[in-house]
Amino acid sequence: MKSILYLLPLCLLACSPENEQVQDEHVQVAPPAKALDSIADTEKDAVRTDETVTDPTLPLPQPVMQLLETRYPGWKVPEIAAGAQQQATEFASGAAFARGDFDGDGRQDVALQLQQGKEVVIVAALQPQDGRYTLEELKRDILFNERGTLRSLYYLYRLPQGEQVQELHSMNEVELPHDAIAVGVGQEVNAYIYRNGAFELFSLENEE
């Protein structure tokens, strides 16, 4: 049976800004961080592809690697907790990465979680031009200490274009115009949908 996705917009204006709040100018997180809107000046190093279903273990594009190293020196892919990895397999995802056309411009983008120190940071790398990327920080949290090993409890996957979603506030059912980023922890899933030049955050529920 096809699941129905219910999207409940979280407080983007009235509530106090926490990790999940995403605005046009910046992303408010704790500790302080800004949206990373630098564009890599590196020349294109790979052939453009319109495919959005890609092996999530493939290497990141070189311009993305350079941006990440500049903004998050010493970053690495975090260890993923077993529960999060299992959740990701249900969506044919590798937990740490998700690929898709997240801004609707026909180019493949990537979302990933990275470890910097004791924190996990979830970032979207959008490709506004072939081979050139911008970074948007979506979420930041503390890594879970599992018997002395730091692990991420989060998993990422792609919500595909055309998915039927319903906003609980308005009860209006809409079809996603392009892919969106799903960020899950346990049974709780948030969706980051790019609209009007910025990511908007929604709470997502699955109904079997």
Image (spheres, rainbow, N blue to C red):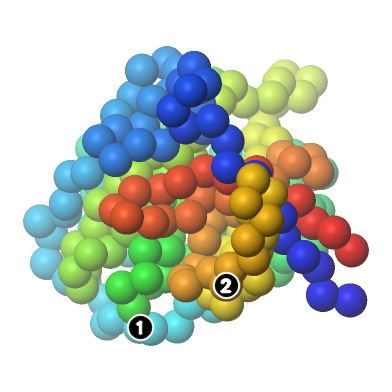
Which residue has dot 2 on it?
Answer: 175
Q: Which mark is residue 139?
A: none
Residue 6's spot in the image, x, y percent?
71, 55
Q: Residue at x 56, y 25 (%)?
A: 141
Residue at screen point 82% across, 75% down: 2
Q: Give the structural element (helix, strand or loop) at label 1.
A: loop
At numbered mark 2, what does the secondary structure look like: helix, strand or loop? strand
Amino acid residing under circle 2:
Glu
Can the viewer see residue 143 in this picture? yes
The residue at the point 42 percent across, 63 percent down is 102
- Rendered residue at 46%/71% (across/down): 178
Quarter of the image for residue 175 reads bottom right
User: Residue 49, which numbered label?
Assistant: 1
Q: Nearer the viewer, residue 22 or 185?
A: 22
200, above or below 121, in the image: below
- Residue 124's place in the image compared with 33, above or below, is below
Q: Nearer the viewer, residue 202 or 34?
A: 202
